[in-house]
Protein backbone atom coordinates (compact mmCIF):
# COMPACT_ATOMS: atom_id res chain seq x y z
CA UNK A 1 0.00 0.00 0.00
CA UNK A 2 1.41 3.37 -1.04
CA UNK A 3 1.49 6.42 1.19
CA UNK A 4 -1.29 7.93 -0.94
CA UNK A 5 -3.45 4.83 -0.40
CA UNK A 6 -2.83 4.97 3.35
CA UNK A 7 -3.82 8.64 3.45
CA UNK A 8 -6.97 7.92 1.46
CA UNK A 9 -7.93 5.16 3.87
CA UNK A 10 -7.24 7.41 6.85
CA UNK A 11 -9.43 10.22 5.48
CA UNK A 12 -12.24 7.79 4.67
CA UNK A 13 -12.10 6.38 8.21
CA UNK A 14 -12.26 9.91 9.64
CA UNK A 15 -15.39 10.63 7.58
CA UNK A 16 -17.02 7.38 8.71
CA UNK A 17 -16.13 8.14 12.32
CA UNK A 18 -17.88 11.51 11.99
CA UNK A 19 -20.97 9.84 10.50
CA UNK A 20 -21.14 7.41 13.42
CA UNK A 21 -20.71 10.14 15.99
CA UNK A 22 -23.45 12.19 14.34
CA UNK A 23 -25.71 9.17 14.90
CA UNK A 24 -25.06 9.16 18.66
CA UNK A 25 -22.32 6.53 18.67
CA UNK A 26 -19.76 7.38 21.37
CA UNK A 27 -16.33 8.71 20.40
CA UNK A 28 -14.37 5.56 21.32
CA UNK A 29 -16.87 3.17 19.75
CA UNK A 30 -17.06 5.30 16.58
CA UNK A 31 -13.27 5.21 16.22
CA UNK A 32 -13.14 1.43 16.72
CA UNK A 33 -15.91 0.74 14.19
CA UNK A 34 -14.51 3.17 11.61
CA UNK A 35 -11.04 1.61 11.70
CA UNK A 36 -12.20 -2.04 11.91
CA UNK A 37 -15.72 -3.05 10.86
CA UNK A 38 -16.18 -0.22 8.32
CA UNK A 39 -12.56 0.12 7.22
CA UNK A 40 -13.35 -0.90 3.63
CA UNK A 41 -16.73 0.84 3.39
CA UNK A 42 -17.48 4.08 1.61
CA UNK A 43 -18.92 6.88 3.78
CA UNK A 44 -22.09 6.90 1.66
CA UNK A 45 -22.64 3.19 2.39
CA UNK A 46 -22.33 3.74 6.13
CA UNK A 47 -24.65 6.74 5.93
CA UNK A 48 -27.26 4.61 4.14
CA UNK A 49 -27.35 2.15 7.05
CA UNK A 50 -28.72 4.78 9.40
CA UNK A 51 -31.70 5.38 7.11
CA UNK A 52 -32.99 2.06 8.47
CA UNK A 53 -33.50 3.72 11.86
CA UNK A 54 -35.88 6.57 12.70
CA UNK A 55 -34.67 10.10 12.03
CA UNK A 56 -32.62 11.57 14.87
CA UNK A 57 -35.49 13.70 16.17
CA UNK A 58 -37.58 10.53 16.62
CA UNK A 59 -34.78 8.14 17.57
CA UNK A 60 -34.52 7.09 21.21
CA UNK A 61 -31.35 6.60 23.22
CA UNK A 62 -33.03 3.84 25.22
CA UNK A 63 -36.32 2.62 23.70
CA UNK A 64 -36.63 0.02 26.47
CA UNK A 65 -35.53 2.35 29.27
CA UNK A 66 -37.76 4.20 31.76
CA UNK A 67 -39.66 7.22 30.47
CA UNK A 68 -38.98 9.14 33.68
CA UNK A 69 -37.27 8.91 37.05
CA UNK A 70 -38.84 6.62 39.69
CA UNK A 71 -42.02 7.77 41.40
CA UNK A 72 -41.52 9.25 44.89
CA UNK A 73 -41.71 7.16 48.04
CA UNK A 74 -44.18 7.35 50.91
CA UNK A 75 -47.35 9.44 50.90
CA UNK A 76 -46.37 11.40 47.80
CA UNK A 77 -46.47 8.19 45.73
CA UNK A 78 -50.05 7.47 46.81
CA UNK A 79 -51.14 11.06 46.21
CA UNK A 80 -49.83 10.80 42.65
CA UNK A 81 -51.62 7.46 42.21
CA UNK A 82 -54.91 8.98 43.41
CA UNK A 83 -54.54 11.83 40.92
CA UNK A 84 -53.76 9.40 38.07
CA UNK A 85 -56.72 7.17 39.00
CA UNK A 86 -59.08 10.14 39.07
CA UNK A 87 -57.81 11.32 35.69
CA UNK A 88 -58.16 7.86 34.14
CA UNK A 89 -61.67 7.48 35.56
CA UNK A 90 -62.73 10.77 34.02
CA UNK A 91 -61.28 9.87 30.62
CA UNK A 92 -62.91 6.41 30.73
CA UNK A 93 -66.28 8.00 31.48
CA UNK A 94 -65.95 10.37 28.54
CA UNK A 95 -64.87 7.50 26.28
CA UNK A 96 -67.88 5.41 27.28
CA UNK A 97 -70.34 8.27 26.80
CA UNK A 98 -68.85 9.27 23.47
CA UNK A 99 -68.92 5.72 22.07
CA UNK A 100 -71.10 3.39 24.20
CA UNK A 101 -69.55 -0.06 23.96
CA UNK A 102 -72.97 -1.71 23.95
CA UNK A 103 -73.78 -0.03 20.63
CA UNK A 104 -70.54 -1.11 18.98
CA UNK A 105 -70.22 -4.26 16.92
CA UNK A 106 -68.33 -7.22 18.39
CA UNK A 107 -65.38 -6.53 16.09
CA UNK A 108 -65.25 -2.86 17.06
CA UNK A 109 -65.44 -3.75 20.77
CA UNK A 110 -62.53 -6.17 20.34
CA UNK A 111 -60.50 -3.35 18.80
CA UNK A 112 -61.53 -0.64 21.26
CA UNK A 113 -61.24 -2.46 24.58
CA UNK A 114 -57.52 -3.40 24.40
CA UNK A 115 -56.65 0.21 23.64
CA UNK A 116 -58.68 1.46 26.59
CA UNK A 117 -57.18 -1.18 28.89
CA UNK A 118 -53.66 -0.34 27.68
CA UNK A 119 -54.27 3.36 28.39
CA UNK A 120 -55.46 2.56 31.93
CA UNK A 121 -52.50 0.26 32.51
CA UNK A 122 -49.87 2.70 31.25
CA UNK A 123 -51.37 5.64 33.12
CA UNK A 124 -51.20 4.10 36.58
CA UNK A 125 -48.50 1.45 35.92
CA UNK A 126 -45.66 3.75 36.92
CA UNK A 127 -46.99 3.79 40.50
CA UNK A 128 -46.74 0.01 40.93
CA UNK A 129 -43.68 -2.22 40.91
CA UNK A 130 -42.65 -5.72 39.85
CA UNK A 131 -40.34 -7.35 42.39
CA UNK A 132 -39.34 -10.97 42.92
CA UNK A 133 -40.03 -12.39 46.40
CA UNK A 134 -36.82 -13.12 48.29
CA UNK A 135 -37.80 -16.73 49.03
CA UNK A 136 -38.09 -17.46 45.29
CA UNK A 137 -34.61 -16.02 44.72
CA UNK A 138 -33.26 -18.32 47.44
CA UNK A 139 -35.11 -21.33 46.05
CA UNK A 140 -33.85 -20.75 42.51
CA UNK A 141 -30.23 -20.13 43.55
CA UNK A 142 -30.17 -23.20 45.81
CA UNK A 143 -31.54 -25.44 43.04
CA UNK A 144 -29.44 -23.92 40.25
CA UNK A 145 -32.61 -22.85 38.44
CA UNK A 146 -33.98 -19.61 36.99
CA UNK A 147 -36.58 -17.44 38.68
CA UNK A 148 -38.60 -16.14 35.73
CA UNK A 149 -41.26 -13.49 35.22
CA UNK A 150 -44.21 -13.40 32.84
CA UNK A 151 -45.49 -10.32 31.00
CA UNK A 152 -48.16 -10.06 33.71
CA UNK A 153 -45.55 -9.81 36.46
CA UNK A 154 -46.03 -13.35 37.81
CA UNK A 155 -42.96 -15.31 38.98
CA UNK A 156 -42.00 -18.96 38.56
CA UNK A 157 -38.85 -20.99 39.35
CA UNK A 158 -37.99 -22.97 36.22
CA UNK A 159 -35.28 -25.12 34.64
CA UNK A 160 -36.74 -25.00 31.12
CA UNK A 161 -39.37 -23.25 29.03
CA UNK A 162 -38.03 -19.70 29.34
CA UNK A 163 -35.82 -17.13 27.61
CA UNK A 164 -33.05 -15.09 29.25
CA UNK A 165 -32.93 -11.35 28.51
CA UNK A 166 -29.47 -10.04 27.55
CA UNK A 167 -29.10 -6.27 27.75
CA UNK A 168 -26.89 -3.47 29.01
CA UNK A 169 -27.88 -1.64 32.17
CA UNK A 170 -26.85 1.71 30.70
CA UNK A 171 -29.62 1.34 28.10
CA UNK A 172 -32.27 -0.57 30.05
CA UNK A 173 -31.97 1.88 32.96
CA UNK A 174 -31.34 4.90 30.71
CA UNK A 175 -33.96 7.55 30.00
CA UNK A 176 -35.22 7.30 26.42
CA UNK A 177 -34.37 10.85 25.31
CA UNK A 178 -31.76 11.79 27.90
CA UNK A 179 -28.31 10.23 28.34
CA UNK A 180 -28.92 9.61 32.04
CA UNK A 181 -28.94 6.28 33.86
CA UNK A 182 -31.61 5.85 36.54
CA UNK A 183 -30.55 4.05 39.71
CA UNK A 184 -32.08 0.65 40.35
CA UNK A 185 -35.03 0.99 42.75
CA UNK A 186 -35.14 -1.41 45.69
CA UNK A 187 -38.92 -1.49 45.20
CA UNK A 188 -38.32 -3.35 41.91
CA UNK A 189 -39.17 -2.19 38.36
CA UNK A 190 -42.26 -0.07 37.90
CA UNK A 191 -44.89 -1.72 35.70
CA UNK A 192 -44.69 0.87 32.96
CA UNK A 193 -40.93 0.39 32.56
CA UNK A 194 -41.35 -3.39 32.89
CA UNK A 195 -43.79 -3.42 29.97
CA UNK A 196 -41.24 -1.56 27.83
CA UNK A 197 -38.60 -4.21 28.57
CA UNK A 198 -40.90 -7.20 28.03
CA UNK A 199 -42.44 -5.51 24.99
CA UNK A 200 -44.60 -6.82 22.15
CA UNK A 201 -41.42 -7.33 20.12
CA UNK A 202 -39.84 -9.40 22.91
CA UNK A 203 -43.05 -11.39 23.31
CA UNK A 204 -42.98 -12.08 19.56
CA UNK A 205 -40.07 -14.44 20.22
CA UNK A 206 -42.73 -16.92 21.35
CA UNK A 207 -41.78 -17.12 25.02
CA UNK A 208 -44.06 -16.60 28.01
CA UNK A 209 -41.45 -16.70 30.80
CA UNK A 210 -38.33 -14.54 30.95
CA UNK A 211 -35.25 -14.45 33.18
CA UNK A 212 -34.22 -10.84 33.77
CA UNK A 213 -31.22 -9.97 35.94
CA UNK A 214 -32.85 -6.72 37.08
CA UNK A 215 -35.35 -8.88 38.96
CA UNK A 216 -33.40 -12.11 39.51
CA UNK A 217 -30.10 -10.80 40.95
CA UNK A 218 -30.25 -9.05 44.37
CA UNK A 219 -29.29 -5.37 44.11
CA UNK A 220 -27.28 -4.24 47.12
CA UNK A 221 -26.63 -0.66 48.24
CA UNK A 222 -24.61 -1.65 51.30
CA UNK A 223 -26.73 -0.07 54.04
CA UNK A 224 -29.38 -2.80 54.27
CA UNK A 225 -29.80 -4.39 57.74
CA UNK A 226 -29.47 -7.86 56.15
CA UNK A 227 -26.67 -6.89 53.78
CA UNK A 228 -24.50 -9.95 54.52
CA UNK A 229 -27.38 -12.30 53.73
CA UNK A 230 -28.01 -10.43 50.47
CA UNK A 231 -24.33 -10.66 49.51
CA UNK A 232 -24.33 -14.41 50.09
CA UNK A 233 -27.54 -14.74 48.09
CA UNK A 234 -26.09 -12.68 45.24
CA UNK A 235 -23.02 -14.95 45.20
CA UNK A 236 -25.27 -18.01 45.01
CA UNK A 237 -27.22 -16.47 42.12
CA UNK A 238 -24.01 -15.62 40.26
CA UNK A 239 -22.75 -19.17 40.74
CA UNK A 240 -26.00 -20.48 39.22
CA UNK A 241 -25.77 -18.33 36.07
CA UNK A 242 -24.13 -21.12 34.07
CA UNK A 243 -27.34 -23.14 34.54
CA UNK A 244 -29.61 -20.15 33.91
CA UNK A 245 -28.17 -19.48 30.46
CA UNK A 246 -27.49 -23.07 29.41
CA UNK A 247 -31.03 -24.16 30.30
CA UNK A 248 -32.74 -21.20 28.62
CA UNK A 249 -34.49 -21.97 25.33
CA UNK A 250 -32.94 -18.78 23.98
CA UNK A 251 -31.10 -15.63 24.96
CA UNK A 252 -33.05 -12.58 23.78
CA UNK A 253 -30.79 -9.62 22.97
CA UNK A 254 -32.00 -6.06 23.55
CA UNK A 255 -29.87 -3.33 21.97
CA UNK A 256 -31.12 0.22 21.52
CA UNK A 257 -30.04 0.38 17.88
CA UNK A 258 -31.50 -2.90 16.63
CA UNK A 259 -34.71 -2.37 18.64
CA UNK A 260 -35.44 0.58 16.35
CA UNK A 261 -34.41 -1.10 13.07
CA UNK A 262 -36.83 -2.21 10.39
CA UNK A 263 -35.24 -4.27 7.60
CA UNK A 264 -35.31 -7.85 6.27
CA UNK A 265 -31.57 -7.63 5.49
CA UNK A 266 -29.74 -9.66 8.16
CA UNK A 267 -26.38 -8.23 7.11
CA UNK A 268 -27.64 -4.69 7.63
CA UNK A 269 -28.83 -5.71 11.10
CA UNK A 270 -25.32 -7.01 11.82
CA UNK A 271 -23.66 -3.82 10.54
CA UNK A 272 -25.78 -1.59 12.80
CA UNK A 273 -25.54 -4.04 15.71
CA UNK A 274 -21.72 -3.86 15.49
CA UNK A 275 -22.01 -0.23 16.67
CA UNK A 276 -24.25 -1.05 19.62
CA UNK A 277 -23.51 -0.85 23.33
CA UNK A 278 -24.39 -4.51 23.78
CA UNK A 279 -20.98 -5.38 22.29
CA UNK A 280 -19.13 -3.24 24.85
CA UNK A 281 -20.07 -5.13 28.03
CA UNK A 282 -18.36 -8.15 29.60
CA UNK A 283 -21.59 -9.69 30.92
CA UNK A 284 -23.19 -9.92 27.47
CA UNK A 285 -20.22 -11.93 26.18
CA UNK A 286 -20.83 -14.52 28.87
CA UNK A 287 -24.54 -14.59 28.12
CA UNK A 288 -24.29 -15.34 24.41
CA UNK A 289 -21.42 -17.83 24.73
CA UNK A 290 -23.49 -19.89 27.18
CA UNK A 291 -26.65 -19.65 25.04
CA UNK A 292 -28.16 -22.54 23.11
CA UNK A 293 -29.81 -20.04 20.78
CA UNK A 294 -29.72 -16.26 20.52
CA UNK A 295 -32.33 -13.88 19.13
CA UNK A 296 -31.82 -10.17 18.36
CA UNK A 297 -34.98 -8.12 18.79
CA UNK A 298 -35.73 -5.57 16.04
CA UNK A 299 -38.75 -3.38 15.39
CA UNK A 300 -40.10 -6.12 13.09
CA UNK A 301 -39.59 -9.01 15.51
CA UNK A 302 -36.65 -11.30 16.26
CA UNK A 303 -33.58 -12.18 14.18
CA UNK A 304 -31.85 -15.51 14.76
CA UNK A 305 -28.20 -14.79 15.63
CA UNK A 306 -26.81 -17.86 13.87
CA UNK A 307 -28.85 -17.13 10.74
CA UNK A 308 -27.38 -13.62 10.76
CA UNK A 309 -23.84 -15.05 10.94
CA UNK A 310 -24.61 -17.43 8.06
CA UNK A 311 -25.97 -14.54 5.99
CA UNK A 312 -22.74 -12.62 6.60
CA UNK A 313 -20.70 -15.62 5.43
CA UNK A 314 -22.73 -15.83 2.21
CA UNK A 315 -22.45 -12.07 1.63
CA UNK A 316 -18.67 -11.96 2.08
CA UNK A 317 -18.29 -14.90 -0.33
CA UNK A 318 -19.93 -13.05 -3.22
CA UNK A 319 -16.80 -11.23 -4.42
CA UNK A 320 -13.41 -9.88 -3.36
CA UNK A 321 -14.99 -6.48 -2.73
CA UNK A 322 -17.74 -8.04 -0.61
CA UNK A 323 -15.14 -10.00 1.35
CA UNK A 324 -13.25 -6.84 2.28
CA UNK A 325 -16.46 -5.07 3.23
CA UNK A 326 -18.08 -7.79 5.32
CA UNK A 327 -15.27 -9.99 6.64
CA UNK A 328 -14.55 -8.04 9.85
CA UNK A 329 -18.24 -7.91 10.75
CA UNK A 330 -18.64 -11.62 10.00
CA UNK A 331 -15.57 -12.46 12.09
CA UNK A 332 -16.81 -10.36 15.03
CA UNK A 333 -20.12 -12.21 15.26
CA UNK A 334 -18.82 -15.65 14.26
CA UNK A 335 -16.55 -15.54 17.34
CA UNK A 336 -19.65 -15.05 19.49
CA UNK A 337 -21.42 -18.20 18.37
CA UNK A 338 -21.94 -20.64 21.26
CA UNK A 339 -18.68 -22.40 22.03
CA UNK A 340 -17.76 -26.01 21.39
CA UNK A 341 -18.14 -28.63 24.17
CA UNK A 342 -14.58 -27.96 25.38
CA UNK A 343 -15.69 -24.52 26.51
CA UNK A 344 -14.21 -21.06 26.12
CA UNK A 345 -10.46 -20.51 26.36
CA UNK A 346 -8.90 -17.38 27.85
CA UNK A 347 -7.54 -16.59 24.38
CA UNK A 348 -11.11 -16.69 23.00
CA UNK A 349 -12.26 -14.35 25.75
CA UNK A 350 -9.29 -12.02 25.22
CA UNK A 351 -9.90 -11.53 21.51
CA UNK A 352 -13.68 -11.27 21.83
CA UNK A 353 -13.54 -8.87 24.80
CA UNK A 354 -10.93 -6.45 23.50
CA UNK A 355 -13.38 -3.56 23.70
CA UNK A 356 -15.63 -4.80 26.50
CA UNK A 357 -15.75 -3.51 30.05
CA UNK A 358 -17.75 -3.70 33.26
CA UNK A 359 -18.97 -1.34 35.97
CA UNK A 360 -15.85 -2.01 38.07
CA UNK A 361 -12.97 -4.46 38.45
CA UNK A 362 -14.94 -6.84 40.68
CA UNK A 363 -17.76 -7.03 38.13
CA UNK A 364 -15.21 -7.53 35.36
CA UNK A 365 -13.74 -10.62 37.03
CA UNK A 366 -17.13 -11.90 38.16
CA UNK A 367 -18.48 -11.81 34.61
CA UNK A 368 -15.99 -14.52 33.58
CA UNK A 369 -16.81 -17.07 36.26
CA UNK A 370 -19.93 -18.73 34.84
CA UNK A 371 -18.30 -18.78 31.42
CA UNK A 372 -15.28 -20.64 32.81
CA UNK A 373 -17.45 -22.82 35.09
CA UNK A 374 -15.84 -21.42 38.24
CA UNK A 375 -17.39 -20.56 41.61
CA UNK A 376 -17.27 -17.02 43.00
CA UNK A 377 -16.67 -16.40 46.70
CA UNK A 378 -18.23 -13.53 48.62
CA UNK A 379 -15.71 -10.86 49.59
CA UNK A 380 -13.13 -11.62 46.91
CA UNK A 381 -11.00 -8.76 45.60
CA UNK A 382 -10.26 -8.41 41.90
CA UNK A 383 -6.76 -9.84 42.33
CA UNK A 384 -8.04 -12.84 44.26
CA UNK A 385 -10.56 -13.53 41.52
CA UNK A 386 -8.02 -13.26 38.68
CA UNK A 387 -5.52 -15.44 40.56
CA UNK A 388 -8.25 -18.05 40.97
CA UNK A 389 -8.81 -17.99 37.19
CA UNK A 390 -5.07 -18.34 36.53
CA UNK A 391 -4.52 -21.17 39.01
CA UNK A 392 -7.60 -22.95 37.67
CA UNK A 393 -6.34 -22.65 34.08
CA UNK A 394 -2.55 -22.26 34.23
CA UNK A 395 -1.69 -23.58 30.77
CA UNK A 396 -4.59 -21.67 29.23
CA UNK A 397 -3.15 -18.50 30.78
CA UNK A 398 0.35 -19.37 29.51
CA UNK A 399 -0.97 -19.15 25.93
CA UNK A 400 -1.70 -15.43 26.33
CA UNK A 401 1.49 -14.56 28.26
CA UNK A 402 3.08 -12.78 25.29
CA UNK A 403 0.12 -10.52 24.47
CA UNK A 404 0.40 -6.78 24.97
CA UNK A 405 -1.62 -5.47 27.86
CA UNK A 406 -1.39 -4.29 31.45
CA UNK A 407 0.47 -6.43 33.99
CA UNK A 408 0.64 -6.05 37.76
CA UNK A 409 -0.48 -9.30 39.38
CA UNK A 410 1.62 -10.50 42.33
CA UNK A 411 4.42 -13.09 42.07
CA UNK A 412 4.67 -15.71 40.72
CA UNK A 413 2.13 -14.42 38.16
CA UNK A 414 3.68 -11.10 37.08
CA UNK A 415 3.77 -12.53 33.53
CA UNK A 416 -0.02 -12.96 33.29
CA UNK A 417 -2.22 -10.16 31.87
CA UNK A 418 -4.05 -8.28 34.60
CA UNK A 419 -7.10 -7.85 32.33
CA UNK A 420 -8.35 -9.80 29.32
CA UNK A 421 -9.65 -6.62 27.69
CA UNK A 422 -7.58 -4.71 25.15
CA UNK A 423 -4.95 -7.42 24.71
CA UNK A 424 -3.19 -7.32 21.34
CA UNK A 425 -0.79 -9.59 19.52
CA UNK A 426 -0.92 -13.22 18.48
CA UNK A 427 -1.07 -16.47 20.43
CA UNK A 428 2.33 -18.17 20.62
CA UNK A 429 2.70 -21.53 22.34
CA UNK A 430 5.70 -23.20 23.92
CA UNK A 431 5.44 -21.74 27.43
CA UNK A 432 4.68 -23.67 30.60
CA UNK A 433 3.06 -22.29 33.75
CA UNK A 434 4.48 -23.80 36.94
CA UNK A 435 3.94 -23.03 40.61
CA UNK A 436 7.15 -20.99 40.49
CA UNK A 437 6.33 -18.98 37.37
CA UNK A 438 6.31 -19.14 33.56
CA UNK A 439 9.05 -21.21 31.92
CA UNK A 440 10.06 -20.76 28.30
CA UNK A 441 12.47 -19.38 25.73
CA UNK A 442 12.50 -15.69 24.68
CA UNK A 443 14.59 -13.53 22.36
CA UNK A 444 16.29 -11.24 24.88
CA UNK A 445 17.64 -7.69 24.66
CA UNK A 446 19.50 -5.73 27.31
CA UNK A 447 18.30 -2.14 27.76
CA UNK A 448 21.45 -0.04 28.00
CA UNK A 449 19.94 3.44 27.88
CA UNK A 450 16.62 5.29 28.02
CA UNK A 451 17.02 8.13 25.53
CA UNK A 452 13.61 9.67 26.18
CA UNK A 453 10.08 8.71 27.13
CA UNK A 454 6.75 10.38 27.80
CA UNK A 455 3.13 10.80 26.77
CA UNK A 456 2.32 11.09 23.07
CA UNK A 457 1.24 14.61 22.12
CA UNK A 458 -1.94 13.58 20.29
CA UNK A 459 -2.77 10.03 21.36
CA UNK A 460 -3.32 8.28 24.68
CA UNK A 461 -0.14 6.22 24.62
CA UNK A 462 3.31 6.32 26.18
CA UNK A 463 6.35 6.52 23.89
CA UNK A 464 9.79 5.09 24.73
CA UNK A 465 13.00 5.74 22.80
CA UNK A 466 15.50 3.12 23.98
CA UNK A 467 19.03 1.97 23.25
CA UNK A 468 19.33 -1.83 23.29
CA UNK A 469 22.12 -4.34 22.74
CA UNK A 470 21.88 -7.23 20.30
CA UNK A 471 23.43 -10.63 20.99
CA UNK A 472 26.79 -9.39 19.65
CA UNK A 473 26.82 -6.58 22.21
CA UNK A 474 26.24 -3.95 19.51
CA UNK A 475 23.97 -1.01 20.40
CA UNK A 476 20.92 0.00 18.37
CA UNK A 477 18.07 2.42 18.97
CA UNK A 478 14.37 1.57 18.94
CA UNK A 479 11.11 3.51 19.27
CA UNK A 480 8.25 1.70 20.98
CA UNK A 481 4.92 2.47 22.64
CA UNK A 482 2.50 1.15 25.20
CA UNK A 483 -1.21 1.80 24.96
CA UNK A 484 -2.05 1.11 28.61
CA UNK A 485 -1.26 3.21 31.66
CA UNK A 486 2.20 4.00 32.99
CA UNK A 487 2.87 2.39 36.38
CA UNK A 488 5.27 2.73 39.30
CA UNK A 489 6.77 -0.67 38.42
CA UNK A 490 7.62 0.61 34.93
CA UNK A 491 9.24 3.68 36.44
CA UNK A 492 11.43 1.39 38.53
CA UNK A 493 12.29 -0.59 35.40
CA UNK A 494 13.48 2.61 33.70
CA UNK A 495 15.51 3.62 36.74
CA UNK A 496 17.23 0.22 36.76
CA UNK A 497 17.99 0.25 33.03
CA UNK A 498 21.29 2.09 33.17
CA UNK A 499 22.79 1.95 36.69
CA UNK A 500 22.36 -1.79 37.33
CA UNK A 501 21.84 -3.10 33.81
CA UNK A 502 18.96 -5.35 34.89
CA UNK A 503 16.27 -4.03 32.51
CA UNK A 504 15.43 -6.48 29.71
CA UNK A 505 13.03 -6.72 26.79
CA UNK A 506 11.78 -10.20 25.90
CA UNK A 507 10.20 -11.11 22.58
CA UNK A 508 8.36 -14.39 21.96
CA UNK A 509 8.73 -14.29 18.18
CA UNK A 510 10.60 -11.91 15.86
CA UNK A 511 9.06 -11.40 12.37
CA UNK A 512 11.09 -13.06 9.62
CA UNK A 513 11.45 -9.83 7.64
CA UNK A 514 11.23 -6.47 9.39
CA UNK A 515 11.77 -4.65 6.08
CA UNK A 516 8.18 -5.30 4.96
CA UNK A 517 4.89 -4.35 6.62
CA UNK A 518 4.36 -6.39 9.77
CA UNK A 519 2.27 -6.36 12.91
CA UNK A 520 3.80 -4.56 15.90
CA UNK A 521 6.36 -6.70 17.73
CA UNK A 522 5.19 -7.30 21.31
CA UNK A 523 7.86 -7.29 24.03
CA UNK A 524 7.73 -7.95 27.76
CA UNK A 525 9.41 -5.38 30.02
CA UNK A 526 11.35 -7.56 32.47
CA UNK A 527 13.37 -6.67 35.55
CA UNK A 528 16.10 -9.28 35.96
CA UNK A 529 16.30 -10.92 39.38
CA UNK A 530 19.13 -12.54 41.33
CA UNK A 531 19.85 -15.10 38.63
CA UNK A 532 20.44 -14.24 34.98
CA UNK A 533 17.37 -16.12 33.78
CA UNK A 534 14.98 -15.08 36.59
CA UNK A 535 12.78 -12.04 36.04
CA UNK A 536 9.66 -10.10 36.95
CA UNK A 537 7.38 -8.71 34.23
CA UNK A 538 6.41 -5.08 34.84
CA UNK A 539 4.64 -4.33 31.56
CA UNK A 540 4.55 -4.76 27.80
CA UNK A 541 5.30 -2.57 24.82
CA UNK A 542 4.87 -2.73 21.04
CA UNK A 543 7.62 -2.00 18.51
CA UNK A 544 6.76 -0.84 15.00
CA UNK A 545 9.83 1.31 14.28
CA UNK A 546 10.46 1.38 10.48
CA UNK A 547 14.15 2.14 11.09
CA UNK A 548 14.70 -1.16 12.91
CA UNK A 549 15.65 -3.65 10.19
CA UNK A 550 16.57 -6.57 12.46
CA UNK A 551 16.02 -7.78 16.01
CA UNK A 552 18.98 -10.04 16.62
CA UNK A 553 18.77 -10.89 20.30
CA UNK A 554 19.99 -13.85 22.30
CA UNK A 555 17.53 -16.70 22.71
CA UNK A 556 17.40 -17.46 26.45
CA UNK A 557 15.44 -19.69 28.78
CA UNK A 558 13.60 -17.66 31.46
CA UNK A 559 11.63 -18.24 34.62
CA UNK A 560 9.24 -15.28 34.87
CA UNK A 561 7.74 -14.95 38.30
Image: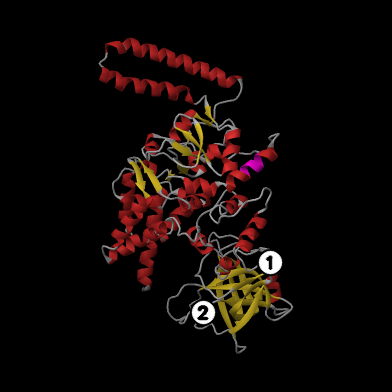
Residue 267 located left or right of residue 127 = left
Front one among 164 and 444: 164
Q: Is residue 442 visible?
A: yes
Q: Which x, y percent locates residue 434?
A: 65, 71
In the displayed image of the protein, which residue is found farthest to the bottom?
A: 472
**Image location of residue 424, percent across then percent down:** 51, 66
Residue 338 image position (x, y, % from top left): 44, 55
Name the residue rendered at 55%, 69% in the picture. Answer: 399
Image quadrant in which the N terminus is located: bottom left
Colouring mode (rainbow / by chain / secondary structure / one colour): secondary structure
Indicate which disc residue 489 carries: 1
Q: Residue at x 49, y 26 (%)?
A: 126
Which quadrant of the rendered structure holds the C terminus?
A: bottom right
Callout 1 crowding tier (Cα within 10 Å): few <14, some 14–19, many ≥20 = some
Q: Which residue is depicted at the point 56% across and 71% down?
A: 402
CA separation, marks 2 and 1?
25 Å
Residue 181: tell me if it is visible.
no
Amino acid sequence: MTDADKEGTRQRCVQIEQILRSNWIGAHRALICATNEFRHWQPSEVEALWKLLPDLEKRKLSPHGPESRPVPRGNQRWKELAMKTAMVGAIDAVALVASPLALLSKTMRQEALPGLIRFNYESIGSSFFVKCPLDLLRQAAHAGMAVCVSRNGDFSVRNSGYAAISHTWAETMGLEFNDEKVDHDDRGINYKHFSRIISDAVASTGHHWFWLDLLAVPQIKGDEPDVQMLRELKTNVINSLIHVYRNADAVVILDSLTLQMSTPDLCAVAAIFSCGRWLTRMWTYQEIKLARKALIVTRDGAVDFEEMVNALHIRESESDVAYKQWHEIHLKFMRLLPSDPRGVSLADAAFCCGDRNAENDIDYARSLFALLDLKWQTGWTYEQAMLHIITSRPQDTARIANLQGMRGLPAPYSWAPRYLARLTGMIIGGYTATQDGLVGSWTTFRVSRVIRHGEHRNETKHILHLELQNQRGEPFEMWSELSHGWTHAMEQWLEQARPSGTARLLCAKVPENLRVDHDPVIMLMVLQGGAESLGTVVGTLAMNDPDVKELDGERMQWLLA
